[in-house]
Image: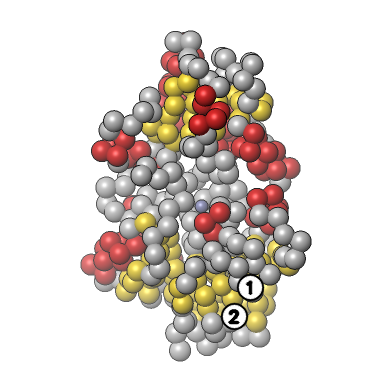
Amino acid sequence: MAWEIKTHHGIHLPQIGWSLDATRRAGRSFVSHAHSDHMARHAEVLCTRATARLMRARLPSKQRTEHILPFGHTEQLTADCTVTLHPAGHIYGSAQILLDHAEHGTLLYTGDFKLLPSHAAETCATPRADTLIMETTFGLPRYVFPPATEIVANLIGFCRDTLAAGATPVLLCYSLGKSQEVLRALAASGLPIMLQSETHRLTRICAQLGLDFPPHAEFDPATHAGHVVICPPHSPGLLKRIPAARTAAVTGWALDHRSFHGSHHAASFPLSDHADFPSLLRFVELVQPKRVLTLHGFAKEFAATLRERGIAGTPIGEPLQCELSLG
Ligand SMILES: [Zn+2]
């Protein structure tokens, strides 16, 4: 008998009584990573140590029971089912879950993932599985990201040019994940960097968890001139305190030039913490699933692409975006 997969505010697996990235309070849920669209105040969670720590910082709860599992360790989840967590490469500590059930076979759920190396996340794994549930945020052929080295070189060029013109480069990045990736990517440039307060707090937690960062300071309106500032996309209060700000969006959606046409940003850089279209296809090739369920972003379109290639692909759930939405 196949895995039964229900979708309602996340994924529910009734045969084992666990949810995956439930977005409403659940009895028991795997939490792939600590982005707000992947977690809620569950009674019991299964996650990595880093996700548990970040979850405590972002969604505190005294009643939560944490089951922390290191990457690559297999444990019994129920009488008939084992569980192993594998790195997803999306943000620090982000995990995929591999379930192996005596009757229903293997099931891999990716959560958000990035196949190519990230500056701030563990290397994404590609374990074999019969049933694959994968995110397909960038599931259209037009989403092909340039090499990360090229994007980072352009980003550093933008920061240097802006500072040379006496202005302040402001890089718009989500506070958890993208900010730490950009901060580490800027390390070799030697540029002085300030972080918005919440970004600074989460970066300090990542440092406590073992990531190292180049020198940086918390944003200070009095002394910010001459610094690169990293802050979340919607920070009107902070931007008001930077009179000579030149903003740059750092997001995979920067590939959608039409969306950016007429935007008020000075620049945009398509550095993403998700897999692009070729990486999504490569991931499926490596996992070798018998059936694939797609969710988030272009789930319908990517499932159709898989079917054209002779792979059973079905879209599930409603679209959700983790990255900067351009409205
Ligand atoms: Zn995410």
**Measured from the top left, where is residue 27 in percent x and y?**
64, 74
Foreground: 26 or 311? 26
**In the image, residue 323 above or below residue 110:** above
Q: Could you tell me which secondary element the residue under label 2 belongs to?
A: loop
**Measured from the top left, where is residue 256 in percent x and y?**
30, 41
The image quadrant of residue 1 is bottom left
Disc 2 residue type (three-letter): Gly
Q: Could you tell me which secondary element the residue under label 1 belongs to?
A: strand
**Measured from the top left, where is residue 72 in percent x and y?**
63, 63
The answer to whether 251 appears left or right of 186 in the picture is left
- Does the beta carbon at disc 2 come under 8 Å from ligand 1? no
| Real-space CA distance between mark 1 and mark 2, rounded to the nearest whole angstrom | 7 Å
Residue at 40% from the left image edge and 45% from the top image edge: 325
Query: Which residue lies under the disc numbered 1?
Result: 28
Labelled disc at residue 17: 2
Density class for disc 1 (Cα within 10 Å; few <14, some 14-19, many ≥20) is many
